[in-house]
Image: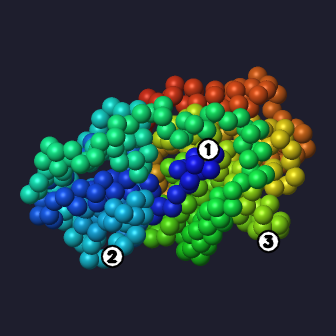
Amino acid sequence: MLKKIFFDQVKPAYGCTEPIAVALSTAIAKQYVDKDIRKINIELDKNTYKNGLVVTIPGTNISGLELAASLGFLCGDAKLKLEVLKNVDSSCIEAAKKLTEKVKISLVNKEHLYINTTVIGTHTVNVKIEGKHDNIVHVEVDSQEVLDKPFNPSGTLLEKIKEYSLDEIIDYVEHPEPEVIEHVEKALKMNLDIAQLGINTPGNFSKGAINEYAKFVSGAVDARMSGALKPVMTVAGSGNQGLSCILPIAIHLNDYPKTAVLKATLLSILVTIYIKSYTGLLSPICGAGIISAAGSAAGLTYLKGGNKTQIKKAINETLGTLFGLTCDGAKRSCALKAAAGTMVALHCSTLALKNIDIPCGNGIVASDVEETIKRVGKLTRSVKKFDEDVLDYIGKC
């Protein structure tokens, strides 16, 4: 089952996954209607909307959910799923700018990822994506169902990982299937490539990094948020999470045996997915800055010879230190939050390896890290009003 969960939650994507999911919905719709359309109406949950407001669309220097929808309709390839905008070019961008005038975005009150797209032209096509960025649950053409598979929040593979303990996840990492390790290796290469692009870009946030960990993470996240047309291996629905839980370990490829680095990276990925199962894929807290940091703290501790107790201490300390770092939408400065989380992860891993931990009862920290994770999940839900209030400020100087 862990193998199945892994492949469900670790996928390549071009660009921020929220506007990409919007683009995927219109790319699906265009298969049933010609390009002479009158209107595109899109309903979104507040988190998808929040993350699509100011982030740059891949292959462009422009932001906006309207542009993402237009690009998906005009030149998106639905078969590529989260890589739907892989083939964006200048001519498509110019045409998409004009089409944005016909796109209307509105909000609906949904607690999970929700995209309800209706394209009106020679036919009326409705496409719904729910729960996960590429989870297409409904397609309807002129009121005739083409696809219908109702979304069940409690039946997802993400929820299934809760059936495992952290000890069982660590045991699995010792003997994973070869195809899982092959995919981890692909993830390392993919995420290191975009990191190098960012590091070599003038003005990239990596220029202020104080060490290699922060340099690679901030370099990659900044490049991605700035619209680099390069794939990123996402983890639990987020490219920034994928970069932040993979790169701090990937930079050790020349320092440790390759197999050890790959297993440590796998642990980081699975811990990130495990914590996300409690907070939800989209939430008011920063996934890259908090949750991926806890994952990378676990992976770094494993890589450096830590035992199960020390690995769990590293996770516990990272969550206890970073919880409260909020998500105020996807944008360039996510790079700085991700780098800050990486630095805390490194510190907490070092403390754990020295058997130094945050005492039980200090803030949200429990003696059992799995209880701490449950508390993080509960507290994340308790600050959900933040998602509504922050929309008043995003994109406004």
Q: Amino acid at mark 3?
A: Asn
Q: Give the quarter of the image for residue 286.
A: top right
Q: Amino acid at mark 1?
A: Met
Expressed as whole percent of the image width and height from the top left, the position of residue 387 reads 43, 35
Q: Nearer the viewer, residue 383 or 298?
A: 298
Expressed as whole percent of the image width and height from the top left, the position of residue 201 reads 55, 74
Q: Give the quarter of the image for residue 263.
A: bottom right
324 is higher (above) or lower (below) than 138: above
Left or right position of 396 against 190:
left
Expressed as whole percent of the image width and height from the top left, the position of residue 388 reads 39, 34
Q: Nearer the viewer, mark 1 or mark 3?
A: 1
Q: Is residue 126 visible?
A: no
Mark 3 secondary-structure assignment: loop
For the image, the number of numbered tags is 3
Q: Nearer the viewer, residue 161 or 235?
A: 161
Q: Amino acid at mark 2?
A: Asp
Disc 2 marks which residue?
89
Disc 1 marks which residue?
1
Left or right position of 334 against 25:
right
- Rate crowding at label 3 as few (under 14), some (14 to 19) or many (20 or more) other CA atoms within 10 Å: few
Tell me the tag on residue 254. Answer: 3
Q: CA distance from mark 3 to mark 2?
A: 37 Å
Picture residue at 79% right of the left edge, 26% below the top? 367
Q: CA distance from mark 1 to mark 2?
A: 40 Å
Q: Is residue 331 visible?
A: yes
Whether pointer 1 and pointer 3 mark residues with C-beta atoms closer than 8 Å, the reply is no
Mark 2 secondary-structure assignment: loop
